[in-house]
Amino acid sequence: MIEVLDSGFHITIQDSGRYGFSKYGVPSSGYMDSISACNANKLVGNSNDEAVFEITMMGGRFAFHSDTSIAISGAIFEITLNNKSIVNNNKIDVKKGDILNFGKALKGFRVYLAISGGFSVNSILNSSSFYENLTPNITVKKGDKFNFLKKNNLDFAGLMDTESIFNSTIEVTPGPEFNLINNKDIQLLNEEYFIVSSNNRMGYFFENGLSPNNFSIITSPVIPGTIQLTPSGKMIALMKDGQVSGGYPRILQMNDLSISILSQKKQGDRIKFKIVELT
């Protein structure tokens, strides 16, 4: 069992997400940075879809009430186990009574804590991922206690690239309404874009944008990674808790790696888009 002594800035439980319910208005949710979450799970012998703690920006202090193994992957945080520094991307054995503490993020924005076997959390619509108005909890709270599931002990097949999540270039493919934008705006897409403060698990917003427009489309499906163009010319990148339909043109689409990269960015960070064609 693990007990939450301090819930930090924003901690949720996420797994690989819930799919097949968008027709009811339910987003997929799940890991914002699937690369790092899967790496953490791999290190402790879990399947890629096990529930983990997603820790955002700073904080989180935990007490272990039984022996287990943990792994941490994603953003680089100040992390100590019993006041001794530990680093990401290693399997670490912990004992009953050990205290794990997360300080502030030094590089990146989100880090993932996996427990051998995964967390025992109720599944709703085939997922344990926290989501407002659907799950009993929105965030992990001080005093919460979570049991572990039975160990999987899967063979370790190696990590995905642990440095790629810190890239500043984000690959995108043209979206269904990409042809609505003109050549001038296509050139503007080559510029740097700044992350503004209003970003979260629903979406990321950029300070600069394209030309104002009066485009409108019939309300259409959107998925995590869809980048919409608003009438003001500003762009919205939909993330894992984002809406499932929208009326703004879908000009670009990110893949899982690109979503992972963007999810590690915070206010003031810069990114560049690289448009690639589907092959």
Image: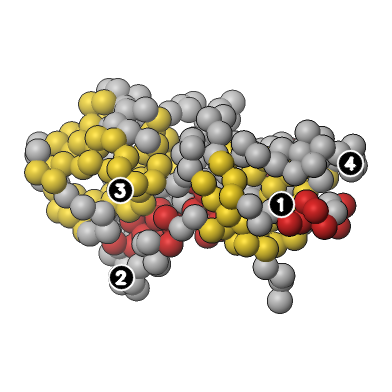
- Nearer-the-camera pick, 54 or 119: 54
Residue at x 62%, y 62% (from the top left corner): 274
**Quadrant location of the N terminus in the rendered image:** top left
Q: Residues within 10 Å of mark 4 (few under 14, many from 20)?
A: some
Residue at x 20%, y 36% (from the top left corner): 101
- Nearer-the-camera pick, 80 or 171: 171
Q: Residues within 10 Å of mark 2 (few under 14, many from 20)?
A: few
Q: Which residue is mark 4?
A: 215
Q: Which residue is mark 3?
A: 76
Under circle 1, the secondary element is helix
Under circle 3, the secondary element is strand
Q: Which residue is mark 1?
A: 188
In the image, taking residue 188 as reference, residue 261 lies left or right, namely left
N-term-proximal mark, 2 vs 1: 2
CA gap, disc 4 and disc 2: 49 Å
- Nearer-the-camera pick, 176 or 276: 276
**Quadrant location of the C terminus in the rendered image:** bottom right
| Type of the residue with mark 3 | Ile
From the top left corner, tell me how far across and down residue 44 is, in percent: 27, 59
Residue 156's label in the rendered image is 2
- Nearer-the-camera pick, 78 or 68: 78
Q: Residues within 10 Å of mark 3 (few under 14, many from 20)?
A: some
